[in-house]
């Protein structure tokens, strides 16, 4: 070590440091505000463009197809009676035209009580 350098104290003297700084005014360091990186990014706003007729499921237009007439693909039903239009013969009362089965329930015309 050179003799011109002052001798350093090994430990900090807290009381002397307090006495030296007690009457000092506060010291603040300020710098310019840091630029926000989000300001550099350029994105279109919500109203800066038009959607036209586009929606989330595709273009919002009327269908480009139409329903054809029934005769083009499905044949017309035949002109005959359906299942509910004629009476079904039954063996319950013995009135079946082909099967000679005796009736199981007596045919009565009186009202039940």
Image (cartoon, grey):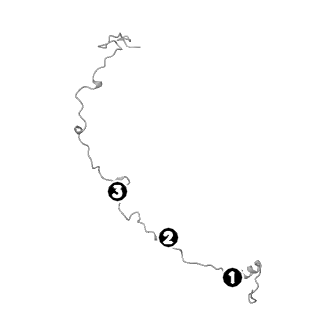
Left or right of 5 on screen, residue 62: left
Of badges 1 and 3, the one in the foreground is 3
Q: Position of residue 16 (x, y in %)?
A: 76, 81
Q: Position of residue 78 (x, y in %)?
A: 23, 29
What label does residue 54 carry, if any? 3
Give how far apart the Cα atoms at labels 2 and 3 are.
Answer: 33 Å
Name, please, the residue furthest toward the bottom: 4
Secondary element at tag 1: loop
Instruction: Please report the residue visible at 30 percent of the width from the left and 53 percent of the height from the top.
Output: 61
Which of labels 2 and 1 is toward the front? 2
The first of marks 1 and 3 along the sequence is 1
Spatial distance from mark 1 to mark 3, Cα to Cα? Answer: 69 Å
Tally of marks: 3
User: Badge 1 is on which residue?
Assistant: 24
Disc number placed over residue 78 in the picture, else none: none
Quadrant of the snapshot with the C terminus:
top left
Question: Which of marks 1 and 2 precedes in the sequence?
Answer: 1
Q: Quadrant of the N terminus?
A: bottom right
Residue sticking out furthest to the front: 1
Q: Is residue 27 above or below residue 37?
A: below
The residue tagged 2 is 37
Q: Residue 72 lies in what quarter of the image?
A: top left
Q: Are marks 2 and 1 in contact (CB under 8 Å)?
A: no
- Which element type, helix, strand or loop, lies under badge 2? helix
For marks 2 and 3 on the same chain, the one whose residue lies earlier in the sequence: 2
Real-space Cα separation, disc 2 to disc 1, in angstroms: 38 Å
Q: Label 3: few (<14), some or many (≥20) within 10 Å? A: few
Residue at image point 73% right, 82% down:
20
Q: Is disc 1 in contact with disc 3, using a CB cutoff of under 8 Å?
A: no
- Residue 14 percent across, percent down from the top left: 76, 77
Query: 47 or 57, which is in the foreground?
Result: 57
């Amino acid at each position: 070590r050179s003799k011109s350098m002052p001798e350093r104290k090994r430990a900090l003297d807290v009381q002397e440091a307090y006495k030296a700084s007690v009457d000092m005014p506060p010291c603040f360091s300020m710098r310019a505000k840091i630029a926000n990186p989000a300001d550099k990014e350029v994105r279109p706003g919500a109203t800066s463009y038009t959607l036209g007729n586009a929606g989330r499921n595709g273009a919002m237009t009327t269908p480009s197809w139409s329903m054809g007439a029934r005769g083009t693909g499905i044949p017309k039903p035949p002109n005959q009676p359906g299942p509910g239009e004629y009476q079904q013969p039954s063996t319950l009362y013995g009135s079946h035209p082909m099967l000679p089965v005796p009736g199981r329930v007596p045919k009565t015309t009186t009202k039940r009580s």
